[in-house]
Image (tube, rainbow, N blue to C red):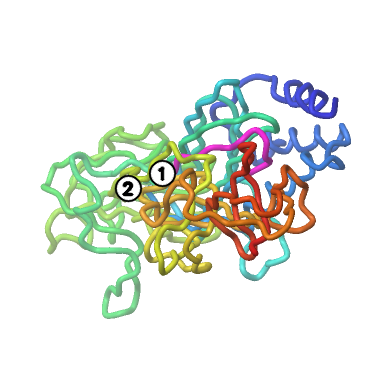
Amino acid sequence: MRRLALLLLAALLGCGPDSPLRDAVREESAHERYARALRDAGLDQAALGRDWLRAAEGALSAAAPVTLPFREAGYFAESEARAVAYRVRLRRGQRIVAAVETQGATPARLFIDLFEPPTPDDSLARPRRVASADSGALRVAVEAERDGDYLVRLQPELLRGVRWTLTLSAEASLAFPVAGKDSRAVQSVFGVARDGGRRSHQGIDIFARRGTPVLAAGAGIAYASDNQLGGKVVWVRDPLRGRSLYYAHLDSQTVGAAERVEAGDTLGFVGNTGNARTTAPHLHFGIYRRGEGALDPYPFVHQPRGSVAVLAADTAAFGAWRRVAARRGAALRVGPDDRAAVLDTLPARTALRVEGASGRYYRVRLPDGSGGYLAAAGTASAETPVARTRAARPEAVRDRPTRVAATVDSVQSGSAVPVLGRFGEFLLVRTAGGRTGWMAAN
């Protein structure tokens, strides 16, 4: 009856309009509404509902550090309350894009949320949600407002199994301001000394042939003018973001005063007017934010290169038992990278469950609930026994490797039992009745 009630509640909570993209900073997110519904129904006092809420918080505190671009495939089993989270580093002006594809026999909601972690001087604060989405094909994109780490969390609704693939990438939040060029044309960067150290460079210089079109990097209101330093210039003010984009040393301008422009519109042409008369033609591009002054424009217009690692690990292992195959053990890492910090070294034959895969790494969960990433090549299927053990006395076979766990079967004294793996002082065995469980080692 309890399971039926939970199924009915999950179906009730799962209905509603799809939201493929949502900026959820000012409104309650789908994840928060779902959590509130669980509490209102009293299910935060039931084991499964309590586990779901704890998994949401625990995933953020244990987020795996990953390098962009990144892709991971995974599986959430309907019988367990799980969530996963990732920590990515961004520069101010970059846009993070999180896209998720799902598969499942039964339609399921999968919540995706992006957070800013608390600043180091406010360690007691909670992560601040900056975007979220749920249902169907998921995509969330948000521009970083500061240099630092951001968190991405995935969690399904209760009692729904779902297979998913998450792709995380970073991209420029502004269009490149010189036609036919990209960030490789930048030859002078932000902050370098000018005029013998009396001032610093408050933008980037993009070199191109004279007459190359200069394009609006973003939408706003354009104003053309002249000044001694920048020569022929164009300002494009974006009142929504409280910032202005500055284009200097133009050979000529194509906009007037208070003219609305969109990204990609031509503002003028590359030249060397103003104090750039002795240099090759180039565009000086700057960004100014009200109350802050000049910002480094490079992350706003640089399109990162690179591709995600090919998924080499066997995804058919999702949800299955595997074991450490290497005799010397295997390193359990905090992320799917050979350079990621080592959490532990797992002894040979340690049993574990596979929950996801990225590149040539599995994301695994150990029988005690801890987890991390393990090189897939260092594991083997636990379907084939590695040994047989003989019970010296009647033994209980339990659902977890502890002496207080529930009994799922038993082994009679003198019976030989196939061993599939081990964890601590317990063996993962298969009984004569076909049940898999944990038995204390002799």
The span picked out in magenta is 72-82
Q: Is residue 402 above or below residue 43?
A: below
Using the image as rendered, state which of residue 97 and residue 3 is in the foreground: 3
Q: Amino acid at mark 1?
A: Arg
Secondary structure under badge 1? strand
At which x and y percent is residue 152?
55, 47
What residue lies at 72% left-to-right and 36% top-to-bottom?
28
Q: Is residue 27 magenta?
A: no
Q: Are marks 2 and 1 in contact (CB under 8 Å)?
A: yes
Position of 305 relative to 29 (above/below):
below
- Residue farthest front in this picture: 414
Q: Residue at x 76, y 52 (%)?
A: 405
Q: Position of residue 15 (x, y in %)?
A: 70, 20
Q: Identify which residue, 398 or 158, lies in the foreground.
A: 398
Task: From the viewer's side, name the closer residue of 383 and 288.
Answer: 383
Q: Residue 309 — which label? A: 2
Q: Which residue is mark 1?
A: 71
Classify residue 15 as left or right of residue 186: right
Q: CA distance from mark 2 to mark 1?
A: 7 Å
Which of the two labelled residues, at mark 2 and mark 1, occupies the earlier sequence position? 1
Task: Say whether residue 432 is left or right of residue 386.
Answer: right
